[in-house]
Image: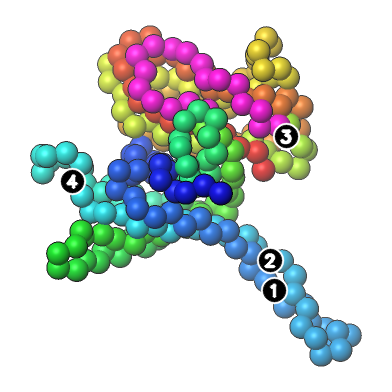
Amino acid sequence: MSVLINGRLYLGAYDLSGYANQLEPKPSVAMKKTTTLLTQGVDQDECGYETFSLGGKLFMLADGTSIATYKSHDIIRAYWKLTDIPLTWCPNGGAVGDLAGSFQATVAECQPNGTVGEFYAATLKADASRGIWVYGAILATGAIVAGGNGAAQLLGAVAATQAVYGALHVLAAAGGTLTVKIQSDDNAGFTSPTDRLSFTAATGKTYQWLALAGPITDTYWRAVWTLPAGSATFVTMAGIR
């Protein structure tokens, strides 16, 4: 059992970890009645469409000392009612190899509330705009000033009925062009890597979500990136479902 003390929350091109106080991932399936004349008066249900949402609590704090810098409610407002914004959360940690979940989100609810003498906060609800959500691992995270690659992660093969999904959050970029790819191989040494997901080159704050259908027999996965000049801070994850 793990205590939630060091989680991470990324929405689009922003890191909300310093504002978030609560994470509530909620997968659900709509159950549909299929009761017929032959069920002898007993309800019969079948699984319908699948949905996913993530709820949480955000403190409405300034990011720094200047009123001109972004606050958490400014970030939410920037993405309000937009669709397909990658949202990635890590329940504990956020380092390369740590468990991470991700989905394409729409910020559907942000309800501020406060009490005299307490921090001003808001409840947040983000709904999956595409229905797909995935668990996987962080493949790269942090600030960089050059190209490199992340450590190999054993995520497994992708069956013919599955896909590999990748989310990229570029939190900062200046003075250069960042390119990020997700590769696979059949060994941890990556002696014969294959590019699977290639994100659009970034010159500033941005985000992207990609998917590739199986089958893929490789079981090891990693992120690789190039940055000929400048600096960048980014996070990327991959998962199979």
Q: Amino acid at mark 2?
A: Gly
Residue stretch rendered in magenta on the structure: 139-156
Q: How far apart, in angstroms, are the residues tagged by discs 2 and 3?
A: 24 Å
> Answer yes or no: do the residues labelled 1 and 2 have beta carbons within 8 Å?
yes
152 is within the stretch colored magenta: yes
* Disc 4 versus disc 3: nearer the observer: 4
**Identity of the amino acid at label 1?**
Lys
Label 2 and label 4: CA atoms lie apart by 42 Å
Query: Which label was assigned to residue 62?
Result: 4
Q: CA distance from mark 3 to mark 1?
A: 30 Å
Q: Mark 3 or mark 1: name the one nearer the start of the chain.
A: 1
Measuring 27% from the left and 20% from the top, which residue is drawn there? 174
Q: Is 232 left or right of 179, judged from the image as shown?
A: left
Report the residue that reaches farthest toward the right.
Answer: 38
Q: Provide the residue designation for mark 3.
A: 158
Vertically, is 109 above or below 200? below
Q: Which residue is mark 1?
A: 32
Q: Closer to the camera: disc 1 or disc 4?
A: 4
Residue underneath mark 2: 48
Q: Amino acid at mark 4?
A: Ala
Direction from residue 25 to residue 234 in the image, left or right: left
Q: Residue at x 30, y 65 (%)?
A: 111
- Circle 4 residues within 10 Å: few <14, some 14–19, many ≥20: some
Label 1–label 4 contact, CB within 8 A: no
Asked whether the residues under the numbered discs 2 and 4 touch, taking CB atoms below 8 Å apart as contact, a structural biologist would say no
The answer, for residue 166, to whether it is visible in the render is no
Q: Secondary structure at mark 3?
A: loop
Does label 2 or label 3 sit earlier along the sequence?
2
Seen at 67% across and 17% down, the residue is 188
2 or 4: mark nearer the eye: 4
Q: Is residue 58 visible?
A: yes
